[in-house]
Image (cartoon, helix red, strand yellow):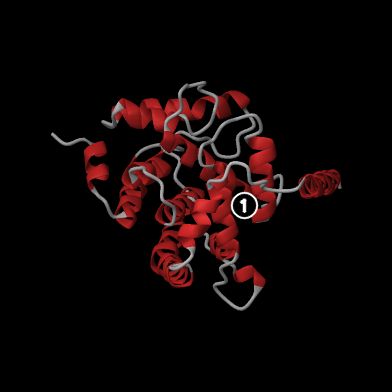
Amino acid sequence: MDTFADYILNEKDLAAKVEIVYYLSKKENIFFDKSVIFKTELARLFLKYNKIDLDENIVLTACLLCNCKKVENTKDFNEIKSFAKKGANYLETLGFEKRFCKICEELNRYSGSNPRERESDILELVEQFGGMLLDRPERLGFSPDDAVVLLIYRNLKNKYNRYVETFSKFIDMLEEIEMGQFVENKALMTLRKMYNETDELSNFIKKVVNQYEPQIDSIISKKYKQVKDEMFEEATNNNRPLFTEETTKRIIGDIDKRKQVIAKQEIL
């Protein structure tokens, strides 16, 4: 008898996978909101337009499910440390193999698992970068440039993620893409605006699948058809400085100022 794992992994269409998890979330106590779709779309784009030898089906399915036991907006550090492990244990009950569960458990570094699965490095990048782009109760979302600096120099400082430089170069590429005539209509900001302006999860899913994906795929395919291979070969150069020391200090300084402003507003 087929398991839920067999069912969703045999479905290769991402939109259909999303629908499957959406209905699972209606029946089971799992975390599934707009942020999951937002981060999965980042992973889809990254895998689609980079030469990475990974099974896209596995990665995107893991993106949809790795946060299944996340507790929203919790300040309990034990919950933060344990939710990925709890999620991995839950996914095993749905029939997923141990390696798939390990990929999901390695969403963050708290499990201490070593060596890490390659797919887990993709999950880590889109989870952390995507999360920084989105507003939270305690802060506003960061700009893509600021989020990349924080990802590299704070979140992943002294940690090895095999795809971080390629991911940084890919974000640079997305920042060059305009989906309208205004700055806020650049590729990532368009997705974030869509996220902010759509309350209902099902409506956000429809907008991403029916509006955003066809448009962004068309633009990238046309604009970068001739040059993307050269861009991503350059991105694998480990000696390339991602940001100057001055740029890093400025961005982190701006973030500290933002925290001070938010703290004053909370006092008032």
Q: Which is nearer the eye, 42 or 207?
A: 42
Q: Which is nearer the eye, 22 or 257?
A: 257
Residue 11 visible from this viewpoint? yes
Outermost residue, bottom side: 181
User: Residue at (58%, 46%) from the top-left corner?
Assistant: 129
In which image quadrant can residue 245 be found? Answer: top right
Q: Is residue 225 left or right of residue 179?
A: left
Quarter that holds the N terminus = top left
User: Residue at (35%, 44%) from the top-left corner?
Assistant: 61
Q: Which is nearer the eye, 189 or 136?
A: 189
Residue type beneath disc 1:
Leu
The local crowd at label 1, few if under 14, some if 14 to 19, many if 20 or more residues have their Cα within 10 Å, is many
Q: Is residue 81 left or right of residue 52?
A: right
Q: Which residue is mark 1?
A: 133
Q: Position of residue 202 (x, y in %)?
A: 41, 58
Count of residue discs: 1
Residue 192 visible from this viewpoint? no
Q: Position of residue 25 (x, y in %)?
A: 37, 44
Q: Position of residue 91 (x, y in %)?
A: 34, 31
Outermost residue, left side: 1
In which image quadrant can residue 105 be found? Answer: top left
Q: Is residue 207 left or right of residue 19?
A: right
Q: Position of residue 250 (x, y in %)?
A: 81, 49
In which image quadrant can residue 99 be found? Answer: top left
Tag 1's secondary structure? helix
Above or below for 178 versus 69 = below
